[in-house]
């Protein structure tokens, strides 16, 4: 994935100097292993800070709403789908955007590499094609990129950007025959009590920091329901009732909009698999309406349209 | 009191002796990370840990604390009267706390324990808790304590400092509280010359591995408004998603909110962690928000830690360099980079 770095810099330089755009949103190299920082380039002399590797899992579409300038943005498959959602929801205008599409082979999961390091601290990580070389005090290991993909990337079926102005590389082969929902089916098969316990345990470590919500491009409401104070809807403690209310409602708010980009899960400081909530709703929307979020720029999402023939088995 | 020593094999007995007299809190492995929790068995304490993900500030300033409770029953003569919610202030030992985290409590004291105001719960917990620290032999790559006036073997905030010397632990007793706690334990020996030399070596290599990662002093000299109005904040703030991760994990972030929660005819007044990163934090009743922009909030976090606090208390920065915010910020905003920018001699326009 590192080869995109040069392509991104070249495009950014060209677009800025030709005054096609005012700014470029990409990543710059992180200060710690497995991390890169979303970065806004405003002038040509900053272009060489742009960087790309398999640690660009944060969704850059999150930085677009309310922008008033002409902006170029690097977009993986999922990011481009979230751009489509933004366009459908009037969060940004297409003619303001210059999309640098990044056909994507998946981002890597920092947490799983950390878990396999078993307490050893990585101090340097360098990606080289299919391998990631990690070293620290007195050790060196090589991780196979493919084995350590983020769990959403491992089941991704839209690696190629769905909208773009130029591509940073040749389209990649889409993964075929992927089963996206084994985990959701496992939860569906649980008894009501089991499932309740499962969710309680899932969110037990949550510290209500809202990194999951804030890393998500879909969460752009001026005031989120959890922050509403006049009147206050949700308690702010870490009591399981309050915390679960937050998670359930957040998931419902992204139903039919979530692209499973994994930004939420990646951002969570305590490693909660918050996609367990959103994937269930993704599956429902797919089964009921045959709809995948952000894939078709010219079709209104099913949850903001009404058709007389809409299935309604959930109304009982 | 001179340093004492105990072999690794006998150390659990010490923990057992402490547990017989005190509530003992120690780093416990929960999932993939350690956190400070009350131990019921000696083997739960895992002193081989690197650093806890959440700082131990919650032991003194809990995430959500029931301060008062009250009744709302109509003809109850006590209705509406706040009564202190029951709390446990029995003597407590925090075992294995890192020197930086202990130092952070001292930095927080200036907020909770002043001549004008004492936060009763913070103060009582501080009084009834003895801090038995554990020196960091192998600081993390994200640590920078030595650049902000503390260090991996700093004794400033501790009652006792333990050093893991391989075959056992040395203990340096630092305060009367420390003396009292060590006094109820037995099995210690005197420190041999080899062990004491080893300890010195460990200290040196730990401190050397940290080095001095930036120069904080220029920030103290600089004009506050020059820093406030600096152009680099625009670049610093871009990636930030304004979550609460950095402030919630930080041992020196003390801000809180107070809320009432009512259930039927009973109510609780609760104190909750709050964060300057949240827009609601400064949202006025009038509807005005003096920090409505992300840039203002990001700047506040760094200016508070690195400029306002040092200027007001002459106590160094409100950061002990534990590195938690560096490690866990989802978008890699690194306070070390921010310090470098703030202390750079020329704040050039971008
Ligand atoms: S909910 Fe999570 S996976 Fe879905 S779009 Fe938002 S950040 Fe991406
Ligand atoms: S990011 Fe994680 S800890 Fe923070 S609110 Fe979301 S689930 Fe909870
Ligand atoms: S600096 Fe990082 S951890 Fe802190 S609020 Fe911003 S994104 Fe969250
Ligand atoms: S600001 Fe960051 S490094 Fe400093 S004490 Fe807080 S969490 Fe630790």
Image (tube, rainbow, N blue to C red):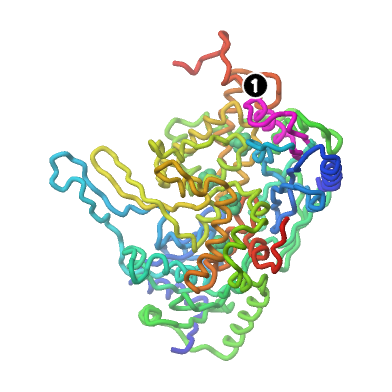
Q: In this view, does B85 lie above or below B343?
A: above
The x, y position of residue B181, in whole percent, is 38, 78
Q: Along the line of sight, which residue is nearer the eye, A260 or B310?
A: B310
Left or right: where does residue A55 sit relative to residue B277?
Answer: right
The x, y position of residue A56, in whole percent, is 72, 46
Q: Along the line of sight, which residue is nearer the eye, B208 or B132?
A: B208
Pointer 1 chain: A
Left or right: where does residue A293 sit relative to residue A16?
Answer: left
Whether B80 is among the magenta residues is no
Q: Which residue lies furthest to the top in this view?
A: A308
**For mark 1, what is the residue?**
A291
Residue range highlighted in magenta? A71-99
Q: Residue furthest bottom?
A: B193
* x 50%, y 61%: residue: B55
* x 42%, y 46%: residue: B284
Q: Quadrant of the N terminus of chain A?
A: top right
The x, y position of residue B130, in whole percent, is 39, 73
The x, y position of residue A214, in whole percent, is 57, 42
């Amino acid at each position: 994935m590192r080869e995109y770095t040069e392509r991104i810099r070249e495009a950014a330089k060209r677009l800025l100097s030709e005054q096609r755009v005012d700014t470029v949103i990409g990543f710059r190299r992180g200060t710690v292993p497995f991390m890169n920082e979303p970065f806004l380039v405003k002038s040509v002399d900053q272009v060489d800070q742009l960087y790309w590797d398999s640690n660009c899992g944060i969704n850059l579409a999150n930085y677009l709403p309310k922008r008033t300038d002409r902006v170029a943005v690097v977009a993986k498959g999922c990011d481009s789908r979230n751009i489509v959602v933004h366009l459908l929801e009037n969060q940004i205008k297409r003619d303001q955007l210059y999309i640098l599409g990044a056909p994507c082979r998946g981002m890597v999961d920092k947490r799983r590499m950390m878990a396999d390091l078993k307490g050893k601290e990585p101090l340097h990580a360098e990606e080289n094609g299919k391998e990631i070389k990690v070293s620290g005090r007195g050790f060196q290991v090589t991780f196979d990129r493919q084995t350590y993909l983020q769990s959403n990337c491992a089941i991704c079926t839209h690696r190629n950007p769905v909208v773009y102005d130029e591509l940073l590389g040749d389209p990649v082969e889409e993964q075929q025959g992927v089963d996206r929902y084994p985990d959701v089916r496992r939860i569906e098969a649980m008894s009501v009590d089991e499932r309740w316990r499962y969710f309680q345990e899932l969110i037990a470590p949550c510290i209500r920091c809202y990194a999951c919500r804030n890393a998500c491009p879909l969460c752009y409401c001026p005031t989120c329901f959890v922050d509403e104070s006049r009147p206050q809807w949700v308690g702010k403690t870490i009591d399981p009732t309050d915390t679960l209310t937050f998670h359930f409602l957040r998931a419902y708010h992204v139903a039919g909009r979530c692209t499973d980009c994994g930004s939420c899960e990646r951002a969570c400081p305590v490693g909660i698999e918050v996609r367990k909530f959103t994937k269930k709703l993704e599956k429902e929307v797919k089964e009921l309406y045959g709809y995948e979020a952000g894939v078709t720029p010219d079709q209104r999402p099913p949850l903001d349209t009404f058709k007389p023939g809409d299935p309604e088995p959930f109304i009982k | 009191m001179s340093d004492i020593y105990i072999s690794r094999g006998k150390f659990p007995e010490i923990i057992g002796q402490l547990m017989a007299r005190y509530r003992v809190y120690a780093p416990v492995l929960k999932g993939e990370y350690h956190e400070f929790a009350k131990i019921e068995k000696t083997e739960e304490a895992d002193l081989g840990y690197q650093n806890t993900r959440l700082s131990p500030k919650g032991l003194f300033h809990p995430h959500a604390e029931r301060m008062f409770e009250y009744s709302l029953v109509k003809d109850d003569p006590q209705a509406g009267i706040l009564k202190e919610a029951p709390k446990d202030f029995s003597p407590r030992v925090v075992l294995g706390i890192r020197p930086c985290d202990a130092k952070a409590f001292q930095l927080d004291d200036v907020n909770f324990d002043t001549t004008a105001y004492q936060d009763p719960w913070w103060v009582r917990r501080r009084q009834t808790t003895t801090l038995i620290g554990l020196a960091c032999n192998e600081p993390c790559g994200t640590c920078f304590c030595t650049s902000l006036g503390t260090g991996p073997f700093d004794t400033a905030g501790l009652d006792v400092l333990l050093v893991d010397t391989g075959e056992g632990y040395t203990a340096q007793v630092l305060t009367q509280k420390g003396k009292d706690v060590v006094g109820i334990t037995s099995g210690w020996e005197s420190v041999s010359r080899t062990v004491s030399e080893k300890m010195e070596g460990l200290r040196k290599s730990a401190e050397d591995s940290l080095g001095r990662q930036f120069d904080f002093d220029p920030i103290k000299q600089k004009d506050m408004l020059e820093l406030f109005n600096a152009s680099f904040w625009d670049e610093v703030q871009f990636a930030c998603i304004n979550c609460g991760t950095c402030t919630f994990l930080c041992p020196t972030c003390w801000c809180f909110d107070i809320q009432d929660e009512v259930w039927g005819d009973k109510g609780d007044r609760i104190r909750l962690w709050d964060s300057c990163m949240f827009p609601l934090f400064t949202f006025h009743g009038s509807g005005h928000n003096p920090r409505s922009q992300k840039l203002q909030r990001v700047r506040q976090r760094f200016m508070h830690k690195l400029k306002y606090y040092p200027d007001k208390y002459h106590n160094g920065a409100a950061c002990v360099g534990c590195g938690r915010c560096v490690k866990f910020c989802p978008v890699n905003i690194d306070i070390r980079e921010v310090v470098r920018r703030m202390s750079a001699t020329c704040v050039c326009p971008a």
